[in-house]
Image: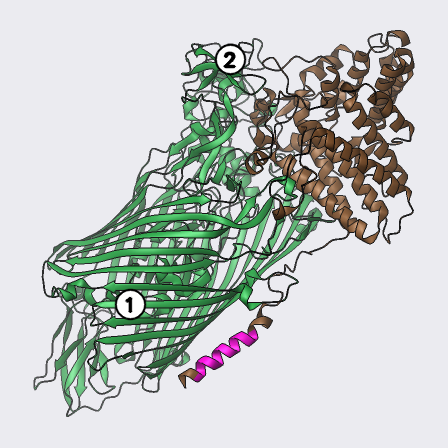
């Protein structure tokens, strides 16, 4: 009797088990796969949020676009940036949030022959890798993104990453130039260019120009390469991620609104005051006030025609001299005034001899100073200053200004391949 | 009539058969105090005929011819047999059950002689629980159980408590004990609405154990070790709190026993961070010379209190939004102004909390059927204005015995309604303590109102903006947040079980137990427009539905294996099926259209998320207990679990991949039996015991075997750690990667112990030593972002726990009128994290990016990790020697983070005393947690803000009084420390320093780590029971008055609030953080209990 009961019980349990368990451990609320068009918007948002958020804030303190006034940011003001400070931007945002997603997006697009998505993914990969290597020098890429399969990917040298960037951009342009075989082409979910392939190709050329320019400090031949890239068809309109305000507000706006802690930087303030720059009404803001310019619905720009024109001006200055660069320089200033809605004030501003010394007397200092003022809180300013030392900055404290970001604490702890570096070391092109 | 009707309703048949010829009467009393015992069952041996004693212990019984003897039985007393002689009176004195044969409830509700157990168990009586006067049952265990560490997350009404038995079993999984009521598992989750998992903000949510009604509990057995809990398999790995509820008690003459109790408590804050009371809101930085402190008024939005001393300030008396006394000016500028007197915002804010508890229970029945019905209600208003918690419990337990008592059916049904209003706390711009403790002494949050909580003008300006010390920016005025940002929750819960058993013979009883625990938790969180945490306004409407079912089929029995009866066997073989599901529907509305209507329909943006967590397990288990001559015992158990949490989506279900076996073996050797000490009065009992067990655990989260895409909206919000971030449409691959190869965590535990009794139980000692080794612990390992993920689940952790539990109890005095018992529960354990995963030298458990709780290999569980000052190899601080630096002469911060504190106590000691003198009983529990540190982030921030008492003796800017001890030096461009001899630079302890690394917002946290040892009088009570003699002829059979207090005394070196607190809540493994946590309370309670 007893034995029988056991056997019946056991049999019942084992036969009903499989049915009992099916799909129980499959998350009913989240899919295991997603198509490229669903991923793209989030990737662009993450990249824009990082670029206009932490990357902008940290670099803007170094470039004196911002002053850290309070709390943690007062410590950063004195170059107290520690490895912990960049964990999120590196790990959550750039690597896991952008590059890993782009890898998935690209793989899915590639598998289905969605060429334009593949091209878009490659452009964004190139852009992001450039941001990573310009701020951190060597960084994982070739062995990265393998999850538990490789917990400690090796670091690629900056030279390797730059060649990856150029390869990606070339491939992107090829793919974007082909007729897309996919049923879905990038469209409304593409917040940057609404799926316009020509614009993406222009952005690819802009990124290429930026990349050459960064390395011009090592090799002056890069100035002409940058000009060639733009000549191949650069940006025709600003590439901005549109923030909506409210619950989807611009990251700098959110920071000012939710934390404060930062005010306008000393060098920027000095320049806009000394040069009687009408944009001071936009840029200048006291600590913890509502920012007149960084509004909730302001876009974060990943690349602008203004910057592109300044690149042209700078490269032309080096390649063809001051006179050739002069009209480009004036045009760049006009573009920058137009971008903030101050087009009418540009002429009077430019008329000042400090701004326009005449074609023959134009110096690199003029160009870089105007670019510095135009690219308000843009991380690119940090690249420019490291390349050119212009405008000249006095350290907030001590004798040196940081020339790169520290590797994140999590990288130092979890990846034994992480090189050692201080924030005062230079990246390879610097 | 009414009573009979009630009985009928409950389908209870009461049958007293009377067919005797002779009347026997008498009194049954207790040997302990000579008082009569009510409810003693008296039966004529060999028949079903019997009766019960009345409230004075008296009985009368008709005895038929031929009856031989009477049996007297009562819970907790040795049964007594008496021959029926020829007389008409039989008086009986009953002895309490001797320790030798004490029966304890063990795994699966099986009652066993304690002496036969190969592992330690602790028991807590219902009276002890109720004596603790806690709304949260878990809190009531504090100090009463050796090996249990109970931590209360906060002193708010409805706050959670955590109990961890014998240290930690899992690195990041649940380490709290499993709760089992009458054989079935119940839910003790703490569900957080905001910041799930790492709640440094939000409100103090309840752990669901709070729903239990202490008045319904008969006793609690704590199964601490692996061998004790091995039969519970994968969910019992942390030990088990076995709760036995009160059942109906048969009553003489079919009457009912009614008990009722009522109590009233008053509570107040027991400890607060100390504040400075001299300096006003302001700063020196923007004054003309950059040195003279300048008062900055609220409308400037200025945040800190580094302004002039209030004695230098006056009120101008003009109408002014921010102060009824007028705006502040320098006395030198306005000599005729009213001198400023500082405001005491902190003490004006907290109120006296009031708790009322009422309960009534009706119990009755007879031979065949019994029932118990109880209703209880608790209403609590907290020390923070508008914070409330309440619960109502309704319980009906019925038991039926049929077929010669062979068939037993017990049903238990409990309905619970609980919930309240909770207030924002912690790291949160709307947190009460955050805004309160930062408020300058020159700003009155209440603006002079006598009733600020009900006066909106206190915290709202005419235009609807907020009146706070930062001109509407910064942090919420506490009066604003308690009124405008309430969190309400309402839990409706049904808990029940249905048990049947049929005893075929001594060899076989078949029993089933079906348990159900289900609740719906409806929540709403509102942030009115202009609330600092959500300036555009926000509302969360959220529902949790939790459903647990637990079903057992059990075969058990016992037999002697030899003819002499020396060797006996008891066995259990059973099956268990458990299922859990949580269905969470979360809807969030932001950007309200207009002020004053905080409702979903007024929200500009709506987001909604559903989250379903579910798992199931089926198990088979068996246990055999062998006893030899009542002195040598051996128990062997085994359990096979199949658990859905190891299934991989999309893969064929392979039972072998999700099934795991856990054995245990334990033995007990009662050496006193062998040595013939049974009747030795000095040393009456001694045993040694040993056990080994393997227990296993599933991943702490379901779906850990796969990686999914999640919507950006609400789940993968794009953010940077500083700001709220954004949501766009679409999906992103989760940054947290699942692992299809996950295996269970395995813990092997070895325990050895002894129990000794001296002088007829006047002194008992119980000692256990245990060692537990956990391998392949599941680690949601933070990984290099370059892997493409931020976290991957890996089976790589290892941890070791060694511990010692000692329980001593004694009765130094025992006379007819005086009895003094004293007990001590000592617990010491150390859990060392041996390994996390290859290359992983830390694991974040919770807290902040700069200061958090981490596992560090080689260190104790959950270390506080954060920024430190830069030191040379000899440990000297490096003092900045760069004269151009802003912080020349001040210590430099290291760029590396280090372990800065250990939150684990060295040992715990609870000392209970119970002194009964005649009808008065005085009892108290003195409780110590010695050692263990806490990060006083509150003080750190208050130091930055210049509101903390440690800034009272600040240097006036320009004055320089301090030379930091250390070596002068700096870090060169290559990151090397360059020193230049002993530091001799005179600096000031001033705004510059405290708002940098001298305060809590710099990169250094080590100087805010403090000893969190506590020595407290956890509770004390004095009760008076009206003597039974005075109640004769009265309907009442028992009247008891109790005056008690909780936390009446607290001694601690900690400089903040009562350090029994947890920023991350009770369900987190990250303990030891205090960042504007809500303070704790002390309370006084007056209660009356009656029985009739």
In the figure, B213 relative to A111: above or below?
Answer: below
Tag 1's secondary structure?
strand
Is B166 contained in the magenta span?
no
Tag 2's secondary structure?
loop
Chain in green, by letter, is B
Q: Nearer the viewer, residue B170 or A58?
A: B170
| Residue B480, position as x, y percentages in the image | 55, 38
| Residue B628, position as x, y percentages in the image | 23, 72
Taking B154 as reference, is A124 left or right?
right
Chain for numbered disc 1: B
Dot 2, how many residues are within 10 Å of its Cα: few (below 14), some (14-19), or many (20+)? many
Q: Earlier in the sequence, mark 2 or mark 1?
A: 1
State which quarter of the image contains the C terminus of chain B: bottom left
Residues marked 2 and 1 touching at CB (< 8 Å): no
- Which numbered dot is residue B294? none
Taking B858 as reference, is B132 left or right?
left
Task: Tell me the distance, in whole angstroms, between the alpha carbons under discs 2 and 1.
Answer: 71 Å
Dot 1, how many residues are within 10 Å of its Cα: few (below 14), some (14-19), or many (20+)? many
Q: Nearer the viewer, residue A50 or A406?
A: A406
In the figure, A82 relative to B960: above or below?
Answer: below
Do marks 2 and 1 share a subunit? yes
Provide the residue designation for mark 2.
Answer: B888
* Quadrant assignment, res B624: bottom left
Provide the residue designation for mark 1.
Answer: B634
Chain for numbered disc 2: B
For chain A, what colour was chosen?
A: brown
| Residue A145, position as x, y percentages in the image | 67, 44
Q: Residue furthest left?
A: B86
In the figure, B702 relative to B1035: above or below?
Answer: above
């Amino acid at each position: 009797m007893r034995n029988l009961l056991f056997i019946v019980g056991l049999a019942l349990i084992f036969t009903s088990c499989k049915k009992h368990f099916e799909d129980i451990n499959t998350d009913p609320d989240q899919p295991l796969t997603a198509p490229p068009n669903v991923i793209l918007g989030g990737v662009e948002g993450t990249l824009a949020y990082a670029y206009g958020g932490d990357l902008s804030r940290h670099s803007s303190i170094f470039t004196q676009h911002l002053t850290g006034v309070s709390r943690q940011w007062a410590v950063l003001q004195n170059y107290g940036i520690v490895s912990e400070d960049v964990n999120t931007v590196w790990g959550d945002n750039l690597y896991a949030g952008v590059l890993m997603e782009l890898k998935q997006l690209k793989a899915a697009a590639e598998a289905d022959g969605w060429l334009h998505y593949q091209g878009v993914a490659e452009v964004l990969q190139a852009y992001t890798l450039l941001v990573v290597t310009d701020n951190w020098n060597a960084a994982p890429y070739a062995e990265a993104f393998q999850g538990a399969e490789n917990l400690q990917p090796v670091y690629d040298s900056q030279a390797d990453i730059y060649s990856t960037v150029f390869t990606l951009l070339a491939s992107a342009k090829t793919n974007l130039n082909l007729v897309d075989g996919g049923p879905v082409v990038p469209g409304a979910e593409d917040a940057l260019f609404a799926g316009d392939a020509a614009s993406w190709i222009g952005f690819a050329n802009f990124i290429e120009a930026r990349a050459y320019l960064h390395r011009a400090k090592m090799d002056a031949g890069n100035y002409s390469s940058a000009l060639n890239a733009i000549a191949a068809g650069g940006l025709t309109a600003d590439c901005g991620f549109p923030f909506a305000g409210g619950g989807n507000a611009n990251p700098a706006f959110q920071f000012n609104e939710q934390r404060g802690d930062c005010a306008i930087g000393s060098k920027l303030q000095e320049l806009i005051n000394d040069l009687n720059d009408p944009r001071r009404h936009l840029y200048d803001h006291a600590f913890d006030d509502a920012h007149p310019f960084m509004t909730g619905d302001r876009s974060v720009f990943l690349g602008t025609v203004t910057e592109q024109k300044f690149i042209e001006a700078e490269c032309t200055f080096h390649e063809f001299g001051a006179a050739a660069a002069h009209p480009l320089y004036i045009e760049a200033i006009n573009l920058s005034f137009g971008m903030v809605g101050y087009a009418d004030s540009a002429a009077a501003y430019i008329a000042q001899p400090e701004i326009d010394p005449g074609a023959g007397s134009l110096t690199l200092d003029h160009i870089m100073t105007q670019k510095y003022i135009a690219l308000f809180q843009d991380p690119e300013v940090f690249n420019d200053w490291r390349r050119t030392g212009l405008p000249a900055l006095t350290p907030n404290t001590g004798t040196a200004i940081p020339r790169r970001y520290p590797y994140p604490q999590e990288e130092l702890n979890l990846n034994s391949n992480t090189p050692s570096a201080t924030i005062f070391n230079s990246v390879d092109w610097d | 009539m009414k009573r009979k009707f009630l009985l009928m309703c409950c389908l209870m048949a009461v049958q007293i058969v009377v067919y005797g010829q002779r009347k026997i009467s008498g009194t049954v009393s207790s040997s302990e105090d000579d008082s009569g015992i009510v409810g003693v069952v008296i039966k004529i041996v060999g028949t079903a005929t019997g009766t019960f004693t009345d409230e004075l212990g008296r009985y009368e019984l008709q005895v038929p011819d031929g009856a031989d003897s009477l049996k007297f039985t009562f819970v907790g007393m040795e049964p007594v047999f008496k021959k029926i002689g020829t007389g008409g009176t039989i008086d009986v004195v009953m002895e309490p059950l001797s320790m030798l044969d004490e029966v304890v409830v063990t795994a699966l509700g099986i009652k066993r002689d304690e002496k036969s157990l190969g592992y330690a168990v602790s028991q807590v009586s219902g009276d002890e629980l109720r004596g603790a006067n806690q709304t949260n049952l878990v809190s009531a265990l504090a100090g009463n159980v050796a090996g249990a560490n109970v931590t209360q997350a906060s002193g708010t009404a409805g706050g959670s408590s955590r109990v961890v038995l014998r240290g930690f079993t899992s690195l990041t999984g649940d380490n709290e004990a499993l709760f089992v009521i009458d054989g079935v598992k119940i839910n003790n989750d703490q569900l957080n609405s905001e910041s799930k998992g790492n709640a440094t903000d939000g409100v103090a949510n309840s752990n669901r154990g709070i729903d239990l009604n202490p008045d319904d509990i008969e006793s609690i057995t704590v199964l601490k070790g692996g061998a004790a809990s091995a039969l519970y398999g994968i969910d019992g790995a942390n030990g088990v709190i076995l709760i036995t509820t009160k059942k109906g008690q048969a009553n003489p003459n079919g009457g009912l026993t009614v008990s009722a109790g009522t109590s009233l408590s008053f509570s107040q804050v027991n400890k607060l961070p100390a504040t400075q009371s001299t300096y006003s809101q302001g700063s020196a930085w923007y004054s003309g010379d950059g040195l003279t402190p300048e008062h900055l008024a609220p409308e400037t939005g200025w945040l800190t209190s580094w302004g002039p001393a209030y004695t230098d300030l006056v009120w101008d008396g003009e109408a002014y939004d921010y102060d009824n006394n007028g705006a502040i000016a320098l006395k030198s500028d306005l000599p005729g102004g009213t001198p400023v007197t500082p405001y005491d915002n902190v003490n004006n804010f907290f109120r006296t909390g009031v708790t009322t508890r009422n309960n009534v229970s009706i119990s009755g029945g007879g031979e065949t059927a019994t029932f118990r019905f109880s209703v209880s209600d608790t209403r609590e208003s907290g020390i923070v204005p508008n914070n409330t918690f309440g619960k109502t419990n309704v319980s009906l337990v019925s038991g039926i015995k049929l077929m010669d008592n062979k068939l037993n059916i017990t049903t238990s049904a409990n309905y619970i309604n609980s919930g309240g209003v909770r207030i924002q706390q912690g790291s949160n711009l709307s947190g009460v303590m955050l805004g309160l403790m930062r408020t300058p002494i020159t700003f009155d949050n209440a603006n002079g109102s006598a009733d600020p909580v009900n006066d909106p003008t206190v915290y709202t300006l005419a235009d609807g903006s907020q009146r706070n010390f930062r001109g509407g920016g910064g942090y919420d005025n506490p009066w604003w947040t308690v009124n405008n940002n309430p969190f309400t929750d309402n839990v409706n819960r049904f808990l029940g079980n249905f048990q049947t058993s049929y005893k075929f013979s001594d060899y076989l009883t078949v029993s089933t137990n079906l348990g159900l625990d289900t609740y719906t938790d409806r929540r709403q969180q509102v942030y009115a427009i202009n609330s600092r945490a959500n300036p555009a306004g926000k509302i969360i409407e959220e529902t949790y539905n939790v459903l647990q079912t637990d079903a057992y089929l059990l075969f058990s029995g016992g037999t002697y294996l030899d003819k002499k009866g020396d060797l006996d066997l008891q066995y259990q073989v059973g099956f268990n099926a458990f299922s859990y599901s949580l269905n969470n529907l979360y809807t969030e509305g932001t950007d309200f259209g207009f002020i004053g209507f905080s409702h979903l329909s007024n929200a500009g943006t709506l987001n909604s998320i559903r989250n379903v967590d579910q798992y199931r397990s089926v198990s088979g288990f068996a246990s055999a207990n062998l006893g030899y001559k009542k002195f040598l015992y051996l128990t062997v158990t085994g359990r096979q679990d199949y658990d859905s949490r190891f299934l991989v989506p999309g893969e064929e279900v392979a039972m072998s991949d999700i099934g795991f076996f856990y054995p245990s073996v334990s033995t007990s050797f009662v050496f006193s039996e062998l040595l013939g000490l049974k009747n030795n009065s000095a040393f009456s009992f001694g045993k040694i015991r040993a056990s080994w067990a393997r227990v296993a655990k599933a991943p702490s989260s379901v779906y850990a075997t796969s990686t999914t895409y999640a919507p950006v909206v609400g789940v993968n919000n794009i953010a940077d750690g500083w700001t709220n971030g954004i949501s766009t449409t679409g999906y992103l691959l989760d940054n947290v990667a699942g692992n299809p190869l996950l295996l269970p965590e395995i813990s092997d535990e070895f325990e050895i112990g002894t129990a000794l009794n001296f002088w007829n139980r006047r002194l008992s000692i119980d000692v256990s030593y245990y060692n537990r080794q956990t391998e392949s612990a599941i680690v949601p390992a933070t990984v290099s972002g370059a892997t493409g993920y931020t976290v991957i689940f890996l089976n790589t952790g290892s941890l070791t726990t060694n511990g010692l539990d000692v329980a001593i109890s004694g009765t130094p005095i025992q006379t007819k009128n005086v009895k003094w018992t004293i007990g001590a529960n000592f617990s010491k354990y150390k859990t060392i994290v041996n390994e996390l995963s290859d290359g992983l030298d830390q694991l974040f458990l919770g807290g902040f990016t700069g200061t958090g709780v981490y596992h560090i290999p080689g260190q104790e569980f959950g270390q506080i990790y954060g920024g430190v000052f830069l030191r040379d190899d000899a440990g000297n601080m490096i003092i900045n020697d760069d004269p151009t630096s802003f912080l020349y002469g001040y210590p430099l911060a290291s760029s590396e983070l280090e372990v800065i504190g250990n939150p684990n106590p060295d040992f715990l000691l609870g000392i209970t005393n119970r002194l009964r003198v005649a009808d008065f009983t005085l009892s108290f529990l003195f409780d110590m947690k010695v050692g263990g540190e806490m990060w006083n982030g509150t003080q750190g921030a208050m130091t930055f803000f210049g509101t903390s008492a440690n800034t009272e003796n600040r240097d006036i800017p320009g004055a320089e009084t301090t030379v930091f001890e250390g070596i002068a030096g700096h870090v060169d461009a290559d990151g090397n420390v360059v020193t230049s001899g002993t530091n001799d630079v005179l600096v000031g302890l001033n705004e510059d320093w405290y708002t940098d690394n001298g305060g809590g917002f710099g990169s250094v946290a080590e100087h805010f780590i403090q000893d969190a040892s506590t020595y407290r009088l956890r509770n004390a009570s004095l009760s008076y029971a009206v003597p039974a003699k005075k109640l004769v002829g009265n309907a009442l059979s028992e009247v008891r008055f109790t005056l008690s207090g909780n936390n009446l005394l607290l001694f601690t070196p900690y400089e903040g609030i009562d350090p029994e607190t947890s920023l991350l809540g009770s369900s987190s493994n990250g303990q030891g953080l205090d960042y504007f946590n809500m303070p704790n309370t002390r309370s006084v309670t007056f209660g009356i209990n009656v029985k009739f």
